[in-house]
Amino acid sequence: MAPDVFVLLSGCLTFGVPLVFAIRELRSLRRGGGGGWRPEPTPPRPSPVPQGGTGKPLPDCLIPKPLPARPRERELEPV
């Protein structure tokens, strides 16, 4: 293979394939109609009544309680 053909094919492979992928991604991002970006969809509001469950409070054994603070252990200094 001639050196100039090798350089041409190597350049196409190095820069051409990523360029084709970039163009394909840009074309897939094109928005239809209106010529602008669509606004962000608003998340649905949480309902005031919890969904599911019976509405009964949890028993005390299932409610996590904070652990008591442990005193720091003494560290002996090297003599």
Image (cartoon, rainbow, N blue to C red):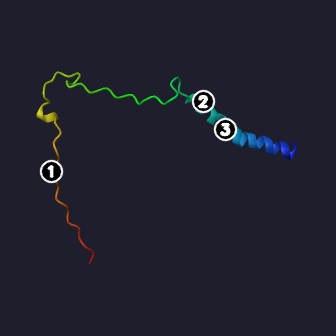
Marks 2 and 1 close (CB-CB < 8 Å):
no
Task: Compare residues 34 and 64 and report the one nearer the observer.
Answer: 34
Please tell me the numbered disc located at residue 77.
none
Callout 3 environment at 10 Å: few (<14), some (14 to 19), or many (20+)?
few
Do callouts 3 and 1 mark residues in contact (Cβ within 8 Å)?
no
Q: Which-is-in-front pick, marks 2 and 3?
A: 2
Q: Is residue 73 above or below residue 38?
A: below
Q: Amino acid at mark 3?
A: Leu
Point out the image quarter for the C terminus. Answer: bottom left
Query: Quarter holding the N terminus?
Result: top right
Residue 18: image location, x then y, percent: 65, 39
Q: Which residue is mark 1?
A: 68
| Badge 2 or badge 3: first in the primary sequence | 3
Residue at the spot of label 2? 27
Q: Is residue 72 left or right of residue 16?
A: left
Q: Earlier in the sequence, mark 2 or mark 1?
A: 2
Residue 75: name its quadrant. Answer: bottom left
Q: Is residue 9 above or below residue 34?
A: below
Front disc: 3 or 1: 3
Q: Rounded to the nearest whole Å, what is the CA distance between mark 2 and mark 3?
A: 12 Å
Query: Which residue reaches farthest right?
Result: 2
- Which of 60/15 is in front? 15
Residue 29 in picture, x, y percent from top left = 55, 30
Quarter where residue 63 is shown: top left
In this picture, residue 27 sits left or right of residue 73: right
In the drawing, does residue 31 fall left or right of residue 75?
A: right
Give me the residue at 20% from left, 26% from top: 48
- Label 3, secondary structure: give it: helix
Quadrant of the rendered image containing residue 56: top left
Say which residue appears at 59% left-offset and 33% top-offset: 26
Q: Which residue is mark 3?
A: 19
